[in-house]
């Protein structure tokens, strides 16, 4: 308590957070500071004896740092009674993560959603305050899960406080959580604290000591006598504060060395263990010849530890002082004893961890045990832990291919955990020449995947690199070879026209060859993709359709692998419905398993795809879901920008061009091309036909697979309106050939609309286009553009009543589907008819936040609170809270009214 003289503001922040939990508006706080600054004491004084709250407290332990989800498991153990109230997939994710059930491992953030639901459910009974000290020592999965939970706590009766050392990178892992940085005490309060330890100290000396200690409370309490002794007399204090941690550790070492030898050894065993497991420490101590009580009593009497069911050191610096002061041989001796004791107690991970600490140099047997521990971590979804343990295993492996193969495996695990820089570091230490062909292929593939993941300009060569990986796998592992070939195609799609190191024809030939090295799904997909590249369109359609149908029939696990591949095939077939279905099923599979990289990618592809054969409104919804996902995992959501969508909704041209050029500089040729194409469509909407022609011609004259045919209808319109009608004829005929071959209503409709633009008598073609594009699920924007062009032609031939009908139809769709630039063009045409169409306020005028708008859109579409919560990585409580705010803001009381209001808006 004395250590908190002057900490009034800090105490109030923690207590206010606890109060929010009582009021059903939880939140999170990260407390960071140097050792001894008072983090633990702040937690003690502010979270003890709180009325109306259930407090759950856990600490981080170094020895658990390789046991995935260990910290989360300890936090959740008191709440097992609420597990049955969670959705099945969340229960399964928690069970697999805890190692109590077998199954496909879930991403740590799906585990986080399960923990969020568990805490929210428990908070409904009694408000919860979760307190985690030494959070920097948690296993990485637990820290990520708790940071995720902290970022998503909104309308729950749960608050979370994390405390850790700022130098351990905890702030980066907990990005997005409010941070409280503890500094030294103010001089007045620090002097009062010092006088509590040394009542007769001279005031001027006290001020100098406070400055030397930097106001660090633990230093002022534990070093007070030493700081007032010889150092002060000799005036050795400089203007800079002392290195407090160093001086405190030296102080504790001196205290330890005053103890009997058996107590010193027992303290070393306890410090080496770091989990606080009394049974494990006693067992190891007995193996070293120590009695069960005498050394423990001596250490407690010195005030260095408290030995209950868990061993607690006076301060982590005591533990590090004890361990750091011991020579290497002594540390290895106690680690061997702890490893043997952990083995007898069945603590597999701890046994291997201590065995590694006890090893000097290399040891193949210990390295093998570490690899088994890494495999256990992988089965539980602990990819960060798996990466770290495999790196340890590699370091203990004798020189040779296995040593470097384990580093490649560590890099793969690090990338799966989203830690691309660490993956790169591991690969940099690999001697590629020492690897066998399969390991070399995995290395090449991982490097290419890293480039894709971080947006490295090297991704322009990722397709060629994946082909090189496939070549390494050839003759050794057919499944890996085929997967690498499919990835080569996908990487090339990202770069599009910027791809380097390989031509499309070369990729197509290699894919065709790869389809013959095995049978099954991957072979079918490879045949479809190679046909897409190599064959005339009409001959390619059957093989592309077979591949697409194979993907449509996939289960969860295969969808995660191949679902995104459907976008090229379905777009090439002009099958927007199949494209949407495959990608949305992939999204659902990714949510079910917590595969957030797949989820992020699939939502992003959906956002891009919706701008062709879909609507900007749905594109914007998917972008917002990507942003919610990025917020949930601690990334800056404002960097999630669909440049083509910006062009559609009327963002400044300079901004769109700048972002598109930036994407090209990073190697994302597909994103750049989509921005250019969208600006060309924007030019059309605004009547800038010459600009549209120039912009779209650069793309049409440099065709790329399934992308260019989608640009042909807009290019035909630009060409016919800018004096280049002769160029449009061949492209109209091409669109008609495509429609004949694929039978798509979408392709047929835009071909009919394009034919109308070059026909002497266009009416029958316009009528046919409107009728075709309105079929089935319809293609709203394509239909609206047909209405618009038909209405404009009708106005020019003075058929005003019919023109009005089609222009209003176009305007209504453009307004509803978030295409303001085209809406304005329709409005201008109506004005030319003497119609005063009102300017309809956009949905942004409803006064809702982006998150509230997303929740409202999904609720209006019929999704339940639980479904919305799963999609946005929120709790159902938070969704309910947002909906109540939306209803209040819009003055409505039902979801039916919500749907009507959004349509009207």
Image (tube, rainbow, N blue to C red):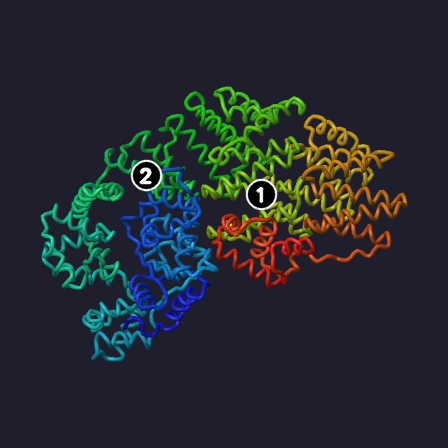
Mark nearest the camera among 2 and 1 is 2
| Number of numbered tags placed on the structure image | 2
Side (left or right) of 532 relative to 29:
right
Image position of 488 with respect to 84: above or below: above
Q: Would you identify the image quadrant in which residue 760 lies? A: top right
Q: Is residue 232 left or right of residue 797?
A: left
> Which residue is labeled 2 in the image?
376
Bin the neighbour count of mark 2 within 10 Å (Cα to Cα): few under 14, some 14-19, many 20 and up.
some
Q: Position of residue 507 (x, y in %)?
A: 56, 26
Q: Which residue is mark 1?
A: 665
Q: Nearer the viewer, residue 767 or 785?
A: 767
Q: Quadrant of the N terminus?
A: bottom left
- Residue sitting nearer the eye, 895 or 168: 895
Task: From the viewer's perspective, tell me whether residue 711 is left or right of residue 757.
Answer: left
Task: Name the secondary structure under disc 2.
Answer: helix
Q: Name the residue nearer the viewer: 420 or 254.
A: 420
Seen at 41% across and 29% down, the residue is 440
């Amino acid at each position: 308590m004395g250590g908190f003289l002057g900490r009034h503001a800090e105490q109030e922040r923690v207590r206010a957070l606890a109060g929010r939990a009582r009021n059903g508006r939880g939140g999170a706080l990260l407390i960071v500071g140097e050792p001894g600054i008072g983090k633990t004491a702040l937690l003690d004084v502010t979270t003890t004896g709180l009325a109306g709250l259930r407090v759950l407290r856990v600490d981080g332990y170094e020895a658990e740092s390789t046991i995935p989800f260990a910290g989360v498991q300890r936090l959740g153990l008191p709440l097992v009674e609420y597990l049955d109230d969670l959705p099945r997939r969340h229960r399964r994710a928690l069970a697999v993560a805890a190692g109590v059930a077998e199954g496909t491992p879930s991403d740590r953030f799906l585990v986080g959603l399960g923990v969020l639901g568990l805490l929210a459910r428990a908070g409904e009974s009694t408000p919860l305050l979760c307190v985690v000290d030494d959070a920097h020592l948690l296993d990485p999965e637990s820290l990520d899960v708790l940071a995720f939970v902290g970022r998503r706590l909104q309308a729950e009766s749960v608050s979370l406080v994390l405390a850790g050392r700022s130098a351990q990178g905890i702030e980066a892992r907990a990005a997005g959580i409010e941070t409280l940085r503890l500094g030294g005490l103010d001089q007045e309060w620090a002097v009062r604290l010092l006088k509590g330890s040394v009542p007769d100290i001279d005031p001027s000396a006290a001020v100098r000591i406070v400055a030397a200690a930097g106001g660090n409370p633990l230093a002022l309490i534990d070093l007070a006598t030493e700081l007032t002794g010889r150092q002060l007399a000799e005036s050795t204090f400089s203007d800079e504060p002392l290195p407090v941690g160093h001086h405190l550790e030296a102080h504790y070492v001196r205290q330890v060395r005053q103890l009997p030898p058996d107590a010193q050894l027992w303290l070393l065993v306890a410090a080496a263990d770091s989990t606080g497991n009394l049974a494990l420490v006693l067992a190891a101590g007995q193996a070293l010849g120590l009695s069960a009580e005498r050394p423990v009593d001596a250490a407690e009497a010195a005030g260095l530890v408290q030995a209950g069911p868990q061993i607690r050191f006076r301060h982590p610096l005591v533990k590090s002082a004890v361990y750091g002061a011991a020579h290497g041989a002594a540390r290895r001796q106690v680690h061997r004893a702890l490893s043997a004791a952990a083995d007898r107690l069945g603590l597999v991970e701890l046994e291997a961890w201590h065995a590694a600490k006890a090893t000097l140099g290399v040891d193949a047997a210990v390295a093998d045990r570490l690899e088994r521990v890494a495999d256990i971590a992988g089965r539980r979804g602990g990819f960060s832990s798996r990466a770290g343990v495999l790196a340890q295993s590699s370091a203990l492996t004798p020189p040779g291919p296995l040593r470097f193969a384990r580093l490649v495996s560590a890099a793969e695990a690090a990338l799966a955990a989203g830690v691309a820089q660490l993956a790169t570091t591991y690969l940099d230490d690999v001697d590629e020449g020492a690897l066998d062909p399969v390991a070399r292929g995995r290395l090449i593939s991982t490097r290419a995947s890293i480039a894709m993941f971080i947006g490295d300009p090297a991704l322009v060569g990722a397709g060629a690199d994946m082909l090189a990986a496939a070549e390494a796998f050839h003759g050794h592992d057919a499944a890996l070879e085929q997967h690498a070939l499919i990835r080569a195609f996908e990487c090339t799609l990202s770069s599009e026209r910027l791809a380097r190191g390989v031509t499309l024809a070369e990729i197509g030939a290699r894919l065709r060859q790869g389809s013959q090295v095995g049978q099954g799904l991957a072979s079918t997909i490879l045949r479809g993709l190679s046909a897409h590249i190599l064959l005339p369109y009409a001959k390619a359609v059957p093989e592309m359709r077979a591949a697409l149908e194979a993907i449509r029939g996939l289960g969860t696990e295969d969808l995660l692998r191949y679902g995104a591949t459907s976008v090229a095939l379905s777009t090439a077939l002009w099958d927007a419905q199949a494209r949407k279905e495959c990608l949305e099923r992939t999204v659902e599979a990714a949510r079910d398993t917590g595969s957030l990289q797949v989820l992020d990618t699939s939502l992003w592809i959906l956002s891009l795809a919706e701008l062709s054969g879909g609507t900007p409104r749905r594109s914007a919804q998917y972008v917002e879901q990507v942003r919610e996902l990025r917020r949930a995992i601690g990334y800056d959501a404002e960097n999630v920008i669909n440049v083509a969508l910006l062009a559609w909704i009327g963002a400044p041209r300079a901004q769109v061009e700048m972002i598109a050029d930036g994407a090209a500089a990073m190697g994302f040729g597909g994103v750049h091309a989509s921005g250019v194409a969208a600006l060309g469509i924007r030019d059309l909407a605004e009547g800038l036909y010459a600009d549209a022609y120039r912009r779209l011609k650069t793309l049409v004259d440099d065709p790329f697979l399934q992308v260019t045919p989608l640009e042909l209808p807009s290019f035909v319109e630009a060409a016919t309106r800018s004096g280049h009608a002769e160029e449009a004829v061949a492209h109209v005929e091409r669109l008609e050939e495509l429609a004949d071959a694929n039978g798509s209503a979408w392709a047929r409709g835009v071909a009919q609309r394009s034919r109308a633009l070059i026909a002497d008598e266009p009416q029958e073609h316009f009528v046919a286009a409107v009728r075709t594009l309105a079929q089935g699920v319809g293609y709203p924007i394509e239909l609206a553009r047909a209405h618009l062009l038909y209405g404009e032609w009708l106005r020019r031939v003075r058929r005003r009543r019919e023109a009005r009908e089609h222009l209003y139809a176009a305007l209504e769709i453009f307004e509803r589907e978030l295409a303001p630039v085209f809406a304005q063009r329709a409005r201008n045409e109506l004005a030319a008819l003497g119609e005063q169409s009102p300017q309809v306020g956009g949905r942004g005028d409803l006064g809702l936040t982006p998150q509230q708008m997303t929740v409202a859109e999904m609720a209006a579409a019929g999704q339940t609170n639980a479904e919305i919560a799963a999609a946005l990585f929120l709790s159902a409580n938070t969704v309910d809270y947002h909906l109540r705010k939306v209803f209040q803001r819009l003055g409505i009381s039902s979801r039916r009214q919500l749907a009507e209001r959004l349509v009207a808006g």
